[in-house]
Image (cartoon, grey):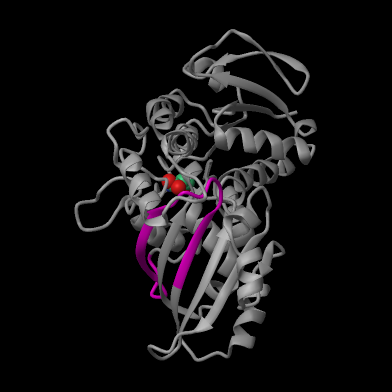
Amino acid sequence: MKKVGLIGWRGLVGSVLLKRMQQEDDFKKAKYYYFSTSNPNTEVVIHGNNYLLKDANSIWHLAEMDIILTCQGSSYTNSIYDELRNNGWQGYWIDASSAKRMHDDSIIALDPVNKEALICALDNGIKNFIGGNCSITLSLLGLNSLFKENLVEWCSMMTYQAASGAGAAYVRELLSQVKYLSDNLDFNNNANTLNVIENAHKVLSSEDFPKQQFCVPLLGNIIPWIDTDLMNGSSKEEWKGEVELNKILGLSTSKDYIKVDGLCIRVSSLRSHSAAITFKLKKNLSLEELEAIIKKSNPWINFIANNKESSIHHLSPIATSESLKIAVGRLKKLNIGENLYSVLTVGDQLLWGAAEPLRRMLNILLQRS
Ligand code: HSE
């Protein structure tokens, strides 16, 4: 049996991954070892079994593994990966972080979209399989067949990203903000609404309002910047949309390269990222034709009819969270130009946006051995 080392399994993505692996009986398919960066050599009980944690900073412990799957983050990858390879380790590296995503010796793993490329990469000796950015992964899954059929000229993506995309501490801060507002707002049903709004605004703007992580309130607000400032008007999250989409589709150096740009916005959803996408097609298609193509994308599409009732109930973070379904809706032809359409994709960024492609990649590797 292959030896698989799991790192960062206690974080948000890691916890979702372990849950999915248990649901799919993956633990029977290999011998798993749990690593820790902070508490190696301590005993833990996982799924009813005792394990002694291995040291995630020990090249020797890591080098014993055939496959390493890490959800520990980019800093960890940057601190250990080169040293591990330089010591001659030949195993497979599966990584949720972006550290190695755009490197030539890595491929972005999203098998419902690029399974052939993944198999070809394996045949060619590629050993690094990296999860894509959550927003682009979800939108690409939702619209896969439009891209595959080479129909898209460009797209503009406006994302509405959940607090949990930023990490556990941020979700906890958002919930602290809810509690702080509720504890400090003088509100009763007879109060004048304008006064209530003004009082709420005072509480949200107060010095003591909990905002250590986000720096500003997320509750009652939006945060119009995600990830670092590239100093060219774009955030790194926005840049990832274009480069990763093209890398996953194998178009990075192709004449069919798809231009993608937009704004990435943090909103106060707890889980599930949404993307409002405007796209230009290379030809005019009816909405019926488009819907049929989108539905072919993959088995996880939940196509939502473009009406108010269906949209408010089924095309939302609350409707998609904890589900592998990707809701695709608000498909309409825009009346501002030729071949322009809008669509909204919503999906659980901890599942398809992070853990699920890694779990499936691990299964591809285990099935080959
Ligand atoms: N960068 C994403 C976010 C998380 O901040 O929501 C997953 O790629």
Comparing 227 with 140, the one in front is 227
Where residue 93 appears, as percent x and y from the top left, is 54, 36
Q: Is residue 256 magenta?
A: yes
Q: Is 222 displayed left or right of 363 in the figure?
A: left
Q: Is residue 75 above or below residue 302?
A: above
Point 80% across, 31% down: residue: 28
Comparing 286 with 151, the one in front is 286
Q: Is 145 displayed left or right of 58 in the figure?
A: right
Can you tell which quarter of the image residue 87 is in? top left
What's the magenta region? 253-277
Where residue 25 appears, as percent x and y from the top left, is 80, 37
Where residue 334 appears, as percent x and y from the top left, is 45, 85
Residue 221 in view in this figure: no
- Spot the residue most to the front: 190
Q: Is residue 210 magenta?
A: no
Where residue 227 appears, as percent x and y from the top left, is 34, 46
